[in-house]
Amino acid sequence: MSGHSKFANIKHKKEKNDAAKGKIFTIIGRELAVAVKEGGADPANNSRLRDVIAKAKANNMPNDTIDRGIKKAAGDANSVNYETVTYEGYGPNGTAIIVDALTDNKNRTAANVRNAFTKGSGNVGTQGCVSYMFDKKGQIVIDKEECDMDSDELMMLSLDSGAEDFSEEEDSYEILTAPEDFSAVREALEASSVSMAEAEITMIPQNYVELTSEDDIKKITRILDLLDEDDDVQAVYHNWDMPEEEDE
């Protein structure tokens, strides 16, 4: 794993600006709609919906916004026609990029994703061309300042409830699980009132690629920024070993 502070990166992402916050809420709103359509509006009987609600709370989405999203999705479940699509490709210097999207128009999304790669001198590849370089994991990140539990107690709670790995960093704890154990671990933490800065199923690179050329860094940043601006894009995973953000 990279030695970078995941929490610092998460914090930076979250505090970037209000537009980014709005984008996160849009993403989660779509995920709520899909979860309700697939498993109903009652979180007690819908583990996917519980996971999306946890993600919403980790991103500081207000409870009434979450409830409104669930009610809206339950009221017009037939109008929810989002499809999940995944694109894989390469950025500069062989960096691997995976893009998850939820879309009601696959042609539009494919064109936008392709355009983002092209503008950063990358290219979209075939399904499976880079995903083998990543492991699908449940990832929970906890801000130390928000956690009253000591690290040993938190580690035991995590491992006892099914986590694969627990690591401590300067400002945060990271818990990794198999995707199928994610809900159980997250719910055990929730039951013990542990506040989570991030809680979701993600793709973690097995190895990271360093970019030393300014030109390559500009190109990959261009790809990631364009993907970030696309409303259809839910998540982007890559194996670029990003430099630490400096505190401004």
Image (tube, rainbow, N blue to C red):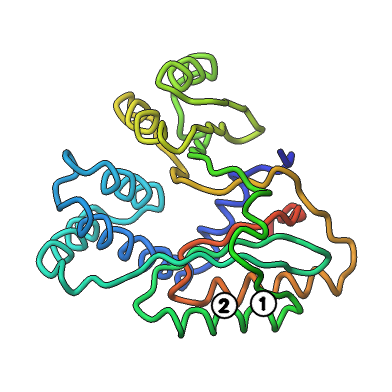
- Secondary structure of the residue carrying tag 2 is helix
Give me the C-alpha separation between circle 1 and circle 2. Answer: 6 Å
- Name the spot of residue 128 as percent of width and height, x first: 61, 58
Amino acid of disc 2: Val
In front of the other: 183 or 196? 183
Amino acid of disc 1: Phe
- Name the spot of residue 148 as percent of width and height, x first: 44, 24
Q: Report the residue at 85% width, 74% height from top.
A: 215
Residue contact between numbered discs 1 and 2, judged by CB atoms under 8 Å: yes
Residue at numbered disc 1: 117
Q: Report the residue at 43% width, 18% height from top.
A: 157
- Secondary structure of the residue carrying tag 1 is helix
Q: How many marks?
A: 2
Dividing the picture into quadrants, the one containing residue 96 is bottom right
Q: Report the residue at 62% width, 73% height from top.
A: 225
Q: Measured along the vertical axis of the image, is residue 17 above or below residue 57?
A: below
Dividing the picture into quadrants, the one containing residue 240 is bottom right
